[in-house]
Image (cartoon, rainbow, N blue to C red):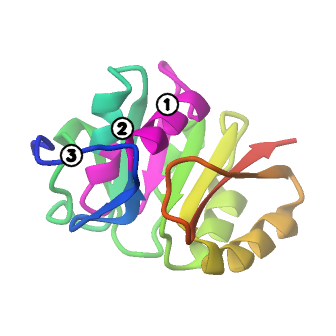
Amino acid sequence: MEIEHLQLSDASRHHPDCCLAISRPLLDKLVVLLPHKPDMVLSIGSGTGLLEAALLQHSQDKIDIVGVEVSSTVNKYLPEQNTLIVSGTWALHLKAQSAAAWMLVYPREPKLLATYIKERASKALQMIMWLGPRNDWPEYANVFEQFQTFHIQLIEDCGLAGYEIMVVATKR
């Protein structure tokens, strides 16, 4: 579960184990925007955990990030204590209710986000961070509009590839 092979630079770069282009400025921005300990960040659909593990390392233990995935075999990089398993792609994890932030990176299905908001959003939730292709954002924007409880901010110049965006939805 070592991420020593991850060579960070100021330019965004794709890595075989992560959909999102990763850069030093991206990790810097995530450290600034995401809640710090003792609050928890839940990465819904964390995949291999490369971004999350890089964030753990880059934040110098300031951020408590836990990845949720459907199988433990998918995770390659996050420590076991930072991973949670759900029974399927539509299953919700109860830990979402105690998380201060949710992070979704290249999510596949807007309905999953809508279900999480409807069934797991609690007073603890301060923000939802969405990272993915600009072309996918309108479908997710519709989800946030349904609930009308979030202020949406598109974060520019955050170290992503030109076709990717970071969106921060904070509770009103």
Query: Relative to 43, is 46 on the left or the right?
Result: left
User: Disc 1 and disc 3: Cα gap in Å?
Assistant: 18 Å
Query: Relative to 155, is 79 on the left or the right?
Result: left
- Closer mark to the observer between disc 1 and disc 3: 3
Label at residue 7: 3
Q: Position of residue 75 (x, y in %)?
A: 20, 58
Q: Which residue, given by chain and number where applicable, does mark 2 sit on?
A: 55
| Magenta region, residue range | 23-52
Q: Secondary structure at mark 3?
A: loop
Q: Which residue, given by chain and number where applicable, does mark 1 sit on?
A: 31
Magenta segment includes 31: yes
**Disc 2 and disc 1 in contact, CB within 8 angstroms:** yes
Query: Looking at the image, is 151 positioned above or below residue 32?
Result: below
Q: Using the image as rendered, state which of residue 114 and residue 104 is in the foreground.
A: 104
Q: Position of residue 68 (x, y in %)?
A: 37, 55
Instruction: Name the amino acid, label 2.
Output: Leu
Between discs 1 and 3, the one toward the N terminus? 3
Q: Residue, x 31% and y 67% (percent of image)?
A: 70
**Disc 1 and disc 3 in contact, CB within 8 angstroms:** no
Label at residue 157: none
Between discs 2 and 3, the one toward the N terminus? 3
Q: Position of residue 86 (x, y in %)?
A: 35, 63
